[in-house]
Image (tube, rainbow, N blue to C red):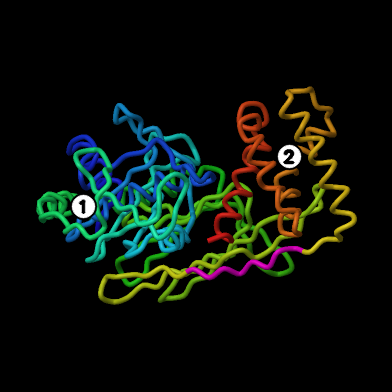
Amino acid sequence: MINKRILIKNLLAYQQENTFFDRKRQLNLHTKEGKAKFLKHICALSNSNPENNSYIVVGIEDNNQIAGTDFYDDSRIQNLINANLENPPDILYENVPFPDLEKGKVIGLVTIKSKKENSYFKKKVWNIPAKSSFIRVGSNSLPINPTQQKPSLENQEIVRDIELNSRNSIKDTLDAVMDFVNNRHKGLTSKYKVFKELFVICWAGIEKKVNDKSFWTRVDIELINEQIKLFYSTLDEVKITYNQESFTITEYVPLGVNGNLDYYPLERTTLNFFNNGEYSIETELLFTPPVANKKTLHHIYNSSLILLSKVENQKELTLEEGNDLNNLPATLLVCYFNDFHQAVDKLIHVKPFLKEQYPIAYQNFKEVMRVLRKIKY
């Protein structure tokens, strides 16, 4: 079983970006340009590694320093790949905690498993034409003919050695469990569960009862053996259930207008564990968008645009407007679900101002975009 934190360290220590490894400071999948660049690198790495995995490590500075990035739980990133690439590789995005990062920050690990045929773009994405294909030459992703033969297996032995040297040990597992329970979540309830005498899941948060049902908030959940953060949120409420064979996370998100929030089931993630030392992850989208009165919502939407204009023009907000701004991401998402199609674009437009001046609103913005990504793909 590969310890993903050790794997990342080994990739970073091996050498600079190359034909099987790329690093990024962050991913930006909010824009067409960001999606196009990400798809280009996926395409190039897949075509350059027909017989071994290739990797993108997210949250790394140009000088190879580990900086961290936001937790990114887009379980449908494979759908983005499938929608835009012909012969798409299999993609796995995992969030890997590092002890020296600030709370909530992780390193993203994208694992790319190639198909036999060359990957290429099905359609135009940003400025990349349809039928475009790419390959890695050193640290660059360069265009090729989609029918060009895949390269020799020069990376296979190197990647195999890196992965073998990243195997987990009993000491790594025990140390990680003790650190999770005793050090990293002081003031929160921490628990762990062992599955099939091999897999260890730890979770921490605040447990509460709502109508005789148990929920968790401020939740952190990790598969310790592989150093993978399965779930992290400071806002959402989560229901956790398990038996001897599986562990299930059901996520609820708060949505509403003007601070009047209800909790809606968003997604169910189930880890199934097997006696042969393998496991699978299944996700099921549960979300049904809230329906609001269009006439009332039209008034709320116009008021929201006025508030966004004040933020963009850096005008001082009243205390009431500041509270409204904190609730604005959830409000505009409800507007978007009720056919106000520009609502999310308006919100994205003021992202830089929220990030610089309004930390609570910015955190709520990130939560809304995370929900939207899951639903969209």
Asked which secondary structure carries label 1, the reply is helix
Residue drawn at (27%, 70%), measured in percent from left and top? 277
Q: Identify the mark nearer the N-term, 1 or 2.
A: 1
- Residue 270 as seen in the image, left or right of residue 91: right
Q: Counting other residues with Cα less than 10 Å from the Cα at mark 2, is it few (<14), some (14-19), or many (20 or more)?
A: many
Dot 1 alpha-carbon crowd within 10 angstroms: few under 14, some 14 to 19, many 20 or more:
many
Q: Which residues are magenta?
A: 283-290
Figure quadrant of residue 58: top left
Element carrying mark 2: helix
Q: Residue at x 88, y 48 (%)?
A: 299
Residue 335 falls within the magenta-colored stretch = no
In percent of width and height, residue 44 lies at 28, 50
Could you tell me the amino acid type at mark 1? Ser
Answer whether labels 1 and 2 touch (C-beta < 8 Å): no
Closer to the camera, 83 or 154? 83
Q: With respect to residue 177, does 281 lie above or below?
A: below
Question: Which residue is disc 1 drawn over?
Answer: 48
Q: Quadrant of residue 130?
A: bottom left
Query: Where residue 251 sits: x, y (%)?
Result: 59, 62
